[in-house]
Image: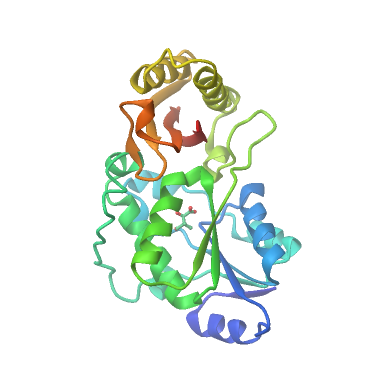
């Protein structure tokens, strides 16, 4: 596995990859867990030429404390990637990624109006800045993103097609701990008490799926209210929002009949740490 810190090193490493296979790309912010490694494994099913980036992108953090606290475990990350079979790891500095300040403002066509968008102003614009920048650098045939960040995946898929990138975007299932907590780099920041309380989020989402499949007694608004109060019944958790959305337009539903593809998104504070999760209802 080749480890590169600069664009020059990366260009050289990319040149050593076999031309007979596609180039796959897994962008990450490091602090890797089995969820990230599953993306690498899915990419490896398609091609041995798997390039992974580790870059904590400052432009997507709307909260400076979140950026400062974001876990950084580069050495362990490299060991995991080597073991998984990645071909190249790109670990650039901010100067390499953004030699000039990135002032691009993207029209996200309304996909950021709900969910994480209004709660994290500028977040998705920053994600699109870094992903397009990395696509320009790596020029991948295909790229892999987790469904835990469902809205991010939908926005990247939309924007990459809209901006004319040739890269095929693949969404990969959320990996969970054995108690159901969605794997996330932020989980390692939880106190033991909050870590114990956090699986209540997924249990509640499962309950919502059961309720939805058994009866249409609840409107989307009533089901979201139910999910919110159930999450808040665990005193160590504080639900920031619940939204039941049309998974194609990413807009909230008022009537079940308004969509064929439906998801519930939640964001929940466990102490200082903000966790997100989502599940398919239909
Ligand atoms: O999901 C993430 O880890 C990041 O948002 C991404 C896609 C690597 C961009 O920085």
Residue 254: quarter of image: top left
Badge count: 0
Residues 185 and 170: in front is 170
Along the line of sight, the residue nearer the viewer: 128 or 78: 128
**Horizontal relation, residue 178 to residue 140: left or right:** right
Up-down relation of residue 211 to residue 29 (above or below): above
Please provide percent x and percent y for residue 140: 53, 73
> Residue at the location (24% across, 58% down)?
107
Q: How is the image coloured?
A: rainbow
Tell me the residue at 75%/61% (across/down): 83
Q: Position of residue 226 (x, y in %)?
A: 42, 15
Percent x, y of residue 87: 68, 72
Residue 84 seen in the figure: yes
| Residue nearest the observer in this picture, 160 or 185 | 160
Q: Quadrant of residue 187?
A: top right
Position of residue 163 measured from the top left corner of the image (x, y, whole percent) = 34, 69
Left or right of 55, for residue 15: right
Q: In the displayed structure, would residue 109 be above or below residue 180?
A: below
Q: Quadrant of the N terminus?
A: bottom right
Image position of 47 (left or right of 141): right
Q: Is residue 274 visible?
A: no
Residue 257, compared with residue 9, is above or below; it is above
Residue at point 52%, 46% (across, down): 147
Left or right: residue 18 versus residue 133 is: right
Q: Is residue 56 above or below residue 240?
A: below
Residue depicted at 33% across the width and 26% down the height:
255
**Residue lying farthest right?**
83
């Amino acid at each position: 596995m080749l480890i590169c810190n600069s664009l020059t090193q990366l260009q050289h490493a990319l040149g050593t990859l076999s031309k007979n296979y596609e180039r796959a790309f897994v962008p990450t912010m490091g602090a890797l867990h089995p969820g990230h490694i599953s993306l690498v494994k899915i990419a490896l099913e398609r091609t041995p030429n798997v390039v992974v980036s580790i870059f904590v992108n400052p432009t997507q953090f709307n909260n400076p404390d979140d950026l400062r606290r974001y876990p950084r475990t580069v050495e362990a990350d490299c060991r995991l990637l080597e073991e998984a079979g990645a071909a190249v790891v790109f670990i650039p500095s901010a100067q390499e990624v953004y030699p000039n300040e990135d002032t691009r403002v993207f029209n996200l066509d309304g996909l950021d109006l709900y969910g994480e968008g209004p709660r994290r102003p500028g977040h998705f614009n920053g994600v699109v800045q870094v992903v397009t920048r990395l696509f320009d650098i790596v020029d991948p045939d295909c790229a892999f993103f987790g469904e835990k960040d469902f809205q991010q995946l939908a926005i990247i898929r939309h924007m990459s097609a809209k901006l004319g990138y040739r890269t095929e975007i693949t969404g990969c299932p959320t990996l969970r701990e054995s108690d159901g907590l969605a794997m996330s780099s932020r989980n390692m920041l939880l106190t033991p008490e909050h870590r114990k309380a956090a699986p209540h989020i997924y249990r509640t989402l499962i309950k919502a799926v059961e309720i939805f499949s058994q009866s249409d007694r609840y409107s989307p608004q009533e089901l979201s209210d139910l999910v919110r109060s159930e999450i808040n019944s665990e005193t160590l958790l504080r639900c920031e929002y619940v939204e039941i959305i049309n998974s194609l337009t990413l807009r909230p539903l008022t009537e079940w009949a308004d969509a064929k593809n439906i998801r519930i998104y939640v964001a929940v504070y466990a102490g200082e740490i903000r966790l997100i999760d989502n599940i398919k209802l239909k």
